[in-house]
Every structure is written in structure tokens, then in C-alpha cells.
Amino acid sequence: MEEDVFIPVEKTRFESHRVTENRPELIHEIKASQKSRVQTKISVVDRLLGGGVVEGSLVLVGGDPGIGKSTLMLQLAEAFSAQDKTVLYISGEESKEQAALRALRLGIKTEKIYLFSETLFSEIKKAVESIKPELLIIDSVQIVYKGELPSLPGSVTQVKEIAMEAMHIAKGLKITTFLIGHVTKSGELAGPRVLEHIVDTVLDFEGDREHGYRILRSTKNRFGPTDEIALFQMGGKGLKEVLNPSEAFLKERIKDVAGSVIVPTMEGSSAFLVEVQALVAPANFSTSSRKSTGLDQNRLSLLLAVLEKRVGYAFQSVDVFVSVAGGMKIVEPAADLGILMAIASSFSKRSINSETVVIGEVGLTGEIRSVSRIESRLKEAIHMGFKYAVIPKKNSVGLPESITKNLTIFGAELVEEAIGQLLSRKGGTSTMQTKKVDYAGTTTTSSTS
């Protein structure tokens, strides 16, 4: 005889529960099959998420106001509904009529998308139980609230509670859930940091409104890579995916102008080319200015110090402005040499050959360090029609013939070598072919400046 103690089930504060009984199991007895994925029919988003949206996952999408979060969610809802899946779109910040007008403008015509303008979570829970959707979109997590909590919507307590409820819905009912989140003035997700720990995937939506480009970046992904990006262009019919970012960023480029350098950069498994522009102008005030757009301000100060100390350039009485054309942001150090060469080109008023790409990380002693994924970067340069490349010397060893026969490579160890190679003569084409360093060019540049 064994005594069986009966423990009454207590009601928890969370309204969403699992549909099946949850009990401990041995790890080797658990059927750990691959989660099924749903294709969004937007190729760049599928690649970003690792092959599609995982069933029952919880995704947080953050971005500046007006950047296009609601537009993207409506387009994803249309992609799900086209696969005969029911979608419930919770519009807490605008009425159903306003959301329907946006859907009409985007050309969305489907009978599988339900719009519900509500902010009280208990009513949202009733709608979920009634409709039983495969995709749930909550716009936004900061506006939805639970009535039994005394705090205001958007407070730390309310945001945590709503995120936990969304997690129970996604995991317990196997409903793929998207949460739209607000961001702070500095661009970080508003609310407690635990919000990012609860969800499975965090997508950051950023971009430059003036250029119309939008970048969807994955900063956390339990089911795929975290270093991929998806590039879109905002238009009258919504967001349109950009399949060739290099062409998009270089289409307005002006060739053979001082202060312009092309840099191959990596975002996840994709390589594309961006234009780094620099302008060095006489300072009008006693304190010189250093400004950057799309680059880390501290990194710019470091590269200017290297140019002053190792090459002999004098920046005390000049203003330095550096920008990445097209609204792109570069965070990887592989763009150091390109930024440095753009500054040197503008300072010496000498243009760099328009068919040249520059890659390399720059150290404090003026050495050029090797970078990762060099072959992917050079293949993209070849694909876009470039003929010359200045890269770290260690990366120039062992390159495949498919690259060396289509691209003239110059490997540099020091910043002085790269400057002598690219700025000793206009364009540096003749020196690139002979692979000789003309150090007289460096001396001329410094003395002339």
C-alpha cells in the first residue's frame, strides 16, 4: 500500500496554459524532431530566420516609429494567409478601419486575416480561443495590458506579463506569435531586458528614411543564424526585397573623386559592396570637428590617430567627416583600411582608382591585419566588375585561381604601403599591375599636405 497525496490545482495568474500535460521525461526518450517551418515567400526574410518561421515560436520585432514594422507584419500576414493559414492581427494602436486602409493600400486581399482592435489581454485571449489562428501578431506589446494589474500599459510589470502570456500562447497552443516592440530614443528595445530573454527571436528594423532602404537584422535567434540581414526598399506598395544590395548601394556613386573608397563588407553569409566617403576641410573654429554617419565615432578617432602618428598627417586644423553612402551601418573592423584610405584620399586631394576595392583591419601600430571571409568579399567585387583589390598580406596567400585571374591583388602589411600603392599616382593602376610600392608617393602626399 502506498499513500497518494492529493494536491489541489491552484489557479495561476497566467491565463494561457498548455493543451497537453507537462511532466519530466528522460532526455533520450524525448522525440526531438526538427521544428516545422513556414515559408514567408519573402526570400530574404526566410534566409534571415534560418529557412522560414518556426511553428510555435515567439518573435519580437523592434524599430523606430514609422520605419515600417506594421507594414512588414501585414505583408507577412498575407504570405501566411496565401498558404491557407489563419492570421489574427491585434491592432492596439489604431482602429480596424485604419489597419484595413493600410492593407488596401498594400493590395492585400484575403479571407484568412482577422483584424481586432483591442488592448485588454483578456479580450485578446478570448479571440485567440475563438479563431484558433496559426499566426498571431500583437501590435504592440507596450499597448496591451492586463486589467488585474494596477500599473499602466507600457510599464515594466505590464510588458513582462504580456510577454509571458504571449510565450504561453506560442508554446502551449503552438501558435506562431509576433510581438511589435517600441524602441527608446537611443534605438534600443523599450521595456525590461528580460523581454529579449523570453522571446525566441529578436529582429531589429532599422534604416534611413531619406533613402528608403530598410534593414531587418537578427540579434537573437534560437532556430537560425544571428548575423544575417534582410534589405528592403520602402515604396508605395509596401516593402520590396532588394536581392542585389551592392548594386543598390553603388548605383549613385560618382567615380574618380577624392575621398571615395569601395569596401566589401559582410553581413552573415552575404557579402556586398558599400561606398565610404570622407571629406577633410579647413576648420573654421579653434576646435576641429570629427563626425561620422554609419560608423563608430570611437573607431574614427582611432584611425585618425594612426594616420597622424604612423604616416605623419596633421589633422589639428581640419574638420573630418566620414559617411557610409546609402544609410548603411558598418560595425566590423574589416572596413578600417577603406575608411583610412578615404580620409587620406580627401586629405591629399587624390582620387583612388574607381575599379579598386580596399579591405583590412588596422592596428594601433599601423599594421594591416587579416580579415575573415576574404574569398566571399573578393568574389562579390569580381561580380560587380572591379579589377583591383588592396587586402592584408596574410589574406593574399593561397587565394584560388578563380579570383587571382580576374582580380589584381596587392597585399599590404602596413598603412604606409597601402597609401603608397593607391595614392602615389592618380588611381594607382600602373603600380597595382607591377605590385611595387612607391614610397616616394607617400612622402609627396605628406609634404604636399
Image (cartoon, grey):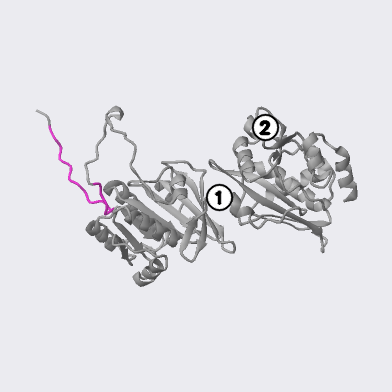
Percent x, y of residue 122: 27, 61
**Label 2 packing within 10 angstroms: few (<14), some (14-19), many (20+):** some
Residue corresponding to mark 2: 395
Q: Residue at x 62, y 56 (%)?
A: 326
Residue 74 is drawn in which quadrant?
bottom left
> From what the image shows, is residue 266 above or below residue 61?
above
Instruction: Identify the image quadrant of the N terminus.
Output: top left
Residue corresponding to mark 1: 244
**Label 1 packing within 10 angstroms: few (<14), some (14-19), many (20+):** few
* Type of the residue with mark 2: Asn
Q: Residue at x 27, y 52 (%)?
A: 16
- Tell me, yes or no, if residue 112 can be seen here: yes
Residue 206 shown left or right of residue 418 in the figure: left
Percent x, y of residue 98: 39, 71
Distance from the alpha carbon under mark 2 to that under mark 1: 26 Å
* Secondary-structure class at tag 2: helix
Q: Are marks 2 and 1 in contact (CB under 8 Å)?
A: no
- The majority secondary structure of the magenta stretch comes to loop
- Tell me, yes or no, if residue 145 can be seen here: no
* Type of the residue with mark 1: Asn
In the image, the segment drawn in magenta is 3-18
Q: Nearer the viewer, mark 2 or mark 1?
A: 1
Residue 156 is drawn in which quadrant?
bottom left
Q: Residue at x 12, y 29 (%)?
A: 2
Q: Which residue is nearer to you in this view: 154 or 426?
A: 426
